[in-house]
Image: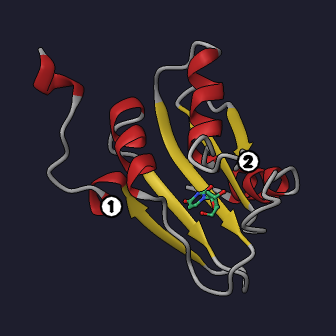
Amino acid sequence: MDYKNLIKAAKLAKKNSHSPYSKFRVGAAILTKSRKIYSGCNIEISSYSLTICAERTALFKAISEGEKKFVALALSTDEEGFTSPCGACRQVISDLAGDIDIILTNGKGKVKLLRTSDLLPHPFTPNNLI
Ligand code: THU
């Protein structure tokens, strides 16, 4: 599976990062089963806790456009090493996208391929409420 365009979209979305407090720019892009890409960046708010991560921006954009099936999510930061999704995003990805490919990128153009289940094993899921 070639995720080049998805990674490109995550990198591009990072340019819109609104991160005046942390200066930590993040871009994410999610690929739907129907091969559409939705991207998003982190958006920081002055009261800090209302900040939203890039992963959730991208995923919420897709969900609000009616998307339901997802294949992969790519993440881009300016870090030399790999950055992986925070705990809150892991739960949101697990709930809304399920066990998909998670593509981490580093500043050197290297890629690490994981699954949601690698990041959040034994998840609490919507099925637990049925
Ligand atoms: N952030 C993300 O957007 N995604 C992550 O996976 C980790 C953290 C954002 C939130 C905040 O704007 C900044 O990075 C520093 O935590």
Amino acid type assigned to the residue bearing label 2 in the image: Ser
- Mark 1 or 2: the one toward you: 2
Q: Position of residue 115 (x, y in %)?
A: 36, 57
For this rendering, which residue is in front, 14 or 114?
Answer: 14
Q: Residue at x 63, y 50 (%)?
A: 48
Q: Secondary structure at mark 1?
A: helix
Give the tally of numbered discs: 2
Label 2 residue SS:
loop
Q: Quadrant of ligand 1?
A: bottom right
Q: Which residue is mark 1?
A: 119
Residue at 86 percent of width and 50 percent of height: 16
Is the C-beta separation of discs 1 and 2 under 8 Å?
no
Q: Which mark is residue 95?
A: none
Q: Is residue 22 above or below residue 1?
A: below
Separation of disc 1 and disc 2 at Cα? 29 Å
Q: In the drawing, does residue 20 fall left or right of residue 120?
A: right
Outermost residue toward the front in this view: 47
The residue at 19%/45% (across/down) is 123
Report whether 87 appears left or right of 129: right
Q: Tell me, yes or no, if residue 3 can be seen here.
A: yes
Give the percent coordinates (x, y) of residue 74.
60, 55
Q: Compare residues 32 and 40 and report the one nearer the observer.
A: 40
Image height of 20 relative to 48, above or below? below
Residue 43 shows up from this direction: no
Q: At which x and y percent is residue 108?
A: 72, 86
Indicate the quadrant containing the N terminus: top left, top right, bottom left or bottom right: bottom right
User: Looking at the picture, which amino acid does disc 1 mark?
Assistant: Leu
> Mark 1 CB in 8 Å range of ligand 1?
no
Asked whether mark 2 lies closer than 8 Å to ligand 1, one says: no
Q: x, y (%) of residue 64?
A: 61, 16
Label 1 vs 2, first from the N-terminus: 2
Task: Look at mark 2 in the image and give the residue it sits on.
Answer: 46
